Amino acid sequence: MDQARALVLLDEERSAALQMLATLTRDFTGIVDASLDSNADDEHDPEGSTIAFERSQVSALIEQTERRLAEVDAARARIDEGTYGRCEVCGEPIADGRLEARPVARTCVTHAAGGNS
């Protein structure tokens, strides 16, 4: 994959992740604010467990989105270093189709099964 196409895909990934992060942060703030306005006791109120669950779920999604942004930044760094598109395990080129589907990929399809991305 050429560098210009990779940059376009990574910019799209970054933009989508930033939008998602803004939405999730707004949702998290709304959940926290709503729980502050109520006298729900997470431990004893039947609704409290739902609020705690929602807060935990949104928090986990925020962390996941932050990791996604970090992956995009790491991929851009690989472009700058001249290593983008090469498998970090075997050094062989990563197929363009894989990079189209997952522009932050660090490994070829063969080595992706080993737990790397």
Image: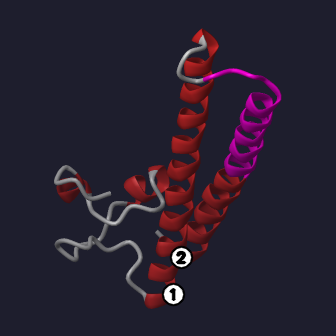
Question: Residue at 51% of width from left, 43% of height from top?
Answer: 60
Q: Name the residue under label 2.
A: 76
Q: What quarter of the picture does the C terminus occupy? A: bottom left
In percent of width and height, residue 2 lies at 51, 73
Find out whether the residues at labels 1 and 2 contact each other: C-beta distance under 8 Å.
yes
| Three-letter amino acid code at the position of disc 2 | Arg
- Answer with left or right where residue 112 lies relative to residue 41: left
Quarter occupied by residue 83: bottom left
Q: Nearer the viewer, residue 18 or 79?
A: 18
- Report how far apart the C-alphas of labels 1 and 2 lie in the structure: 6 Å
Q: Nearer the viewer, residue 27 or 74?
A: 27
Q: Which residue lies furthest to the right in this view?
A: 37
- Answer with left or right where residue 104 lies relative to residue 113: right
Q: Mark 1 points at which residue?
A: 80
Element at badge 2? helix
| Dot label at residue 26 | none
Q: Does the magenta stretch include residue 100?
A: no
Q: Give the range drawn in magenta.
A: 19-41
